[in-house]
Image (tube, rainbow, N blue to C red):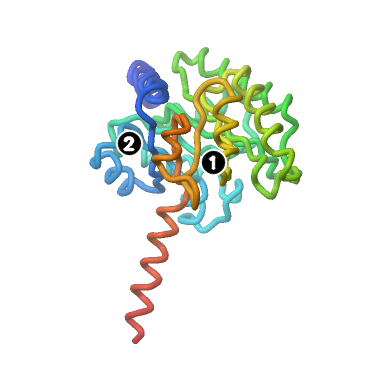
């Protein structure tokens, strides 16, 4: 482990505390320059976006990039700032819990997103099996002496899940409770678009819930509903690339 365990523990504890204070807003980044901008703007933590990092590296999202390259990029983010860093570790890249924890701590990360999509077989991982794996990650982090903050992403609202729309809220609640019982610190139902759905999830899933802004869900609405954490995923990367595309196309005029 290259980073000091005591410093990592302090950062992990601070990241956990941030989930119980004012709503934690995380403008996700993909490189050290972006991380520096976010930290200098006063945000108390920095999060990475796997989709943005993979695209930067020339690979598709969904564990399409080699984990070594993904972790190397995330490590540069962590070294660039003095605030806690949480890494989008996708579905864990097939790693056993202790290996995943060791890799995260080696790059200086004290939090991680872990999603329940099965990128190899398709669909979602069986909820009980995923909960057991999350429990293993929690145990490995405890053994390492660093209480890594686990943000358990629930992908039931994504098309890949194959779950009919009328069943999504109930299945998300079921999975969210299982993942919390397994030791996840926060539950992240990604892709929820409607106010009544996120309100139900906040009410029915114990503990902090991570939300996304959208057409009907701005920061004020999510705060009002009790959402503890807000992620932006690859949004700022895509906006940056769109701006670059427009600018370079104008050079051809």
Q: Is residue 151 above or below residue 70?
A: above
Viewer-closest of 125 and 82:
125
User: Which image quarter holds the N terminus?
Assistant: top left
Residue 114: image tag: none
Q: Residues within 10 Å of mark 2 (few under 14, many from 20)?
A: some
Q: Position of residue 160 (x, y in %)?
A: 70, 48
Q: Nearer the viewer, mark 1 or mark 2?
A: 1
- The residue that appears at 62% across and 17% down in the rendered structure is 181
Residue ID at (44%, 40%): 221
| Mark 1 or mark 2, earlier in chain | 2
Residue 195 circle label? 1
Q: Please, what secondary structure does the residue beneath circle 2 have? A: helix
Relative to 136, residue 153 above or below:
below
Residue 79, numbered label: 2
Q: Against 33, is 101 above or below?
A: above
Q: Are marks 1 and 2 in contact (CB under 8 Å)?
A: no
Q: Quadrant of the C terminus?
A: bottom left
For the point 38% across and 26% down, which residue is it? 2
Residue 209 percent coordinates (x, y) = 51, 30
Q: Is residue 106 left or right of residue 93?
A: left
């Amino acid at each position: 482990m290259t980073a000091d365990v005591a410093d990592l523990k302090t950062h992990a504890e601070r990241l956990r505390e941030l989930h119980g204070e004012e709503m934690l807003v995380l403008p996700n980044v993909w490189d050290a320059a972006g991380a520096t901008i976010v930290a200098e703007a006063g945000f108390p933590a920095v999060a990475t976006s796997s989709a943005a990092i993979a695209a930067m590296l020339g690979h598709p999202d969904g564990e399409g990039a080699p984990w070594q390259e993904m972790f190397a990029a995330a490590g540069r983010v962590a070294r660039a700032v003095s605030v806690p860093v949480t890494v989008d570790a996708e579905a864990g890249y097939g790693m056993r819990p202790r290996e995943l924890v060791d890799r995260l701590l080696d790059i200086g990360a004290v939090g991680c997103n872990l999603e329940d999509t099965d990128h190899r077989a398709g669909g979602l991982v069986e909820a009980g099996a995923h909960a057991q794996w999350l429990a293993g990650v929690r145990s490995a982090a405890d053994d390492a002496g660093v209480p890594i903050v686990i943000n358990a992403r629930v992908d039931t609202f994504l098309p890949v899940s194959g779950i009919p729309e009328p069943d999504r809220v109930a299945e998300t609640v079921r999975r969210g409770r299982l993942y919390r019982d397994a030791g996840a610190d926060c539950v992240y139902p990604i892709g929820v678009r409607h106010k009544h759905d996120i309100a139900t999830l906040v009410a029915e899933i114990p503990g902090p819930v991570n939300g996304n802004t959208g057409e009907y869900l701005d920061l004020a609405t999510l705060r009002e509903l009790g959402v503890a954490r807000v992620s932006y995923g690859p949004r700022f990367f895509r906006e940056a690339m769109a701006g670059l595309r427009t600018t370079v196309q104008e050079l051809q005029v």
